[in-house]
Amino acid sequence: MSKGLPKRSENYSEWYNEIVKRANLAENSPVRGCMVIKPYGFAIWEKMQRALDDMFKATGHENAYFPLFVPKSFLEKEEEHAEGFAKECAVVTHYRLKANPEGKGLIVDPEAELDEPLIIRPTSETVIWNAYKNWIQSWRDLPLLINQWANVVRWEMRTRIFLRTAEFLWQEGHTAHATRGEAIEETEKMLGVYATFAEQWMAMPVIKGLKTPSERFAGAEETYCIEALMQDGKALQSGTSHFLGQNFAKSFDVQFVNKENQLEYAWATSWGVSTRLMGALIMVHSDDQGLVLPPKLAPIQVVIVPIYRQPEDLATIDAKITPAIEKLKSLGVAVKYDADDKYKPGYKFAEYELRGVPIRLGIGMRDVENNTIEIARRDTLSKETVSLDGIEERIVDLLNEIQANIYQKAYRFREENTFRADNWEQFKEQIEKGGFILAHWDGTAETEEKIKEETKAT
RNA sequence: CGGGGCGUAGCACAGCCUGGUAGUGCGCUCGGUUUGGGACCGAGAGGUCGGAUGUUCGAAUCAUCUCGCCCCGACCA
């Protein structure tokens, strides 16, 4: 087996797939288009979830859970929504199997057909607004600020781990408001939350934007999004926030009595980010040595590798390093001490680099004698031997520095790959090279269509 | 659904053109030496060559069909 990774510059897809595989993040499952998220990958996702969830709570939202199944009739109620999602829905038509009377195995029991097919949710607006009908009577019930962590299924034609899977994990916020203005404010606020999360936690600079009518969420009046630039020069939509107007309130008859004692339809928003963020995280920072994780999302922030010959040496190193480990833990740093003797140090170095661990410490007998330790940074791949005294504070500072540094690096990359095009020729020329382009648009769908036809820009 | 590529040991692959004892590297097991950037030596275990049919004395190899995976496009968070 080759030890090196494919080069990022040579084959971006292959490089991405290899990182996902070798960093132990996820793998394809036997079910078409679905993925298995492995413990290490899931640990990163959990950190993202926790950070996002805290941000949702801080903005007044509460979590709830709605069913996986959506009756077909629900999906049909909002016309544009129905049309938009119809072609990618998984449908449940039966509730029972039985032994095959003509041989082995099981068959779908033809007598167990459901009266109404159930759709496996591609998104939950319909089930949720059906529930909101009973939850909302008065302006005093508003705003209703709910979020759900769930899995959804969209039967995509072509799938890719984390970036586009048939089933994916996400968070979907669904809010109801008394006024149009308040709902728009919420839509923009949550887009801001996503942008803050992307920048402060993922160290990923994003551009906030407004989607054109043709790219809007099915059933929305306005779709806002954040877009990040990947290292291959392509943009990745990383989060969306929709202003749904009164569309769903009207379809599900959600009316409330306002302060003037008049019946009015509620105003809606919905917003979501998914496991696609994992894909973005990988593509934005990783290099030819593997994954690079921002310290704030790294399940292991610091790994310590003892280097020893004899078991007695290991015991000496253990004794020397244990106080530092305890101190780091008390400072809230996720430390792993890897004294496993199955692998040699060199192997471990390569392995933790592949997994994106931000800081690696190496300590051997030489260090014990000199009261030193070797610090290696994942972001710069640089190494330095420093005194063991005060190492804990130094680590905490360094974690912050790495977080800032990889953000800066990604930011510079984006700046260097953002261009201005003032005419059609410049635009066409640049789009071939990739990157973001600031261009002029007359705002019509015809022009948008023409641009998409003649180039591959979105 | 279109266009390309690939299915041979747990993983990565060679062998196929020109049919004749199923191979290499990594990993795994055992023993020994090693341990500051993916250690080395020795001995082992591990295969319905994706599946079916055909051609042949003989098929991983040739033919037909079939299934699966990956990449590129249309679709999308």
Image (cartoon, coloured by chain):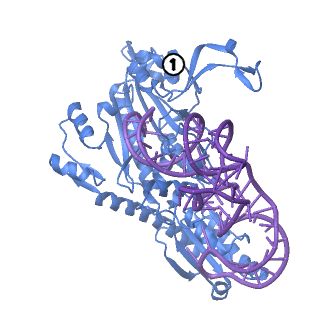
The amino acid at mark 1 is Asn
Front residue of B6 and A373: B6
Task: Say which element carries label 1.
Answer: helix
Q: Is residue A177 visible?
A: yes
Q: Is residue A397 above or below residue A19?
A: below
The quarter of the rendered structure image containing the N terminus of chain A is bottom right
Which residue is located at x 36 percent, y 50 percent? A234
Question: Disc 1 is attached to a residue of which chain?
Answer: A
Color of chain A here?
blue
Which residue is located at x 38 percent, y 18 percent? A259
Chain letter for the purple part:
B
| Residue that mark 1 sits on | A130
Front residue of A177 and A293: A293
- Left or right of residue A225, residue B26 in this image: right
Q: Position of residue A329 (x, y in %)?
A: 64, 64
Which residue is located at x 58 percent, y 71 percent? A360
Front residue of B5 and A262: B5
Q: Position of residue A46 (x, y in %)?
A: 58, 48
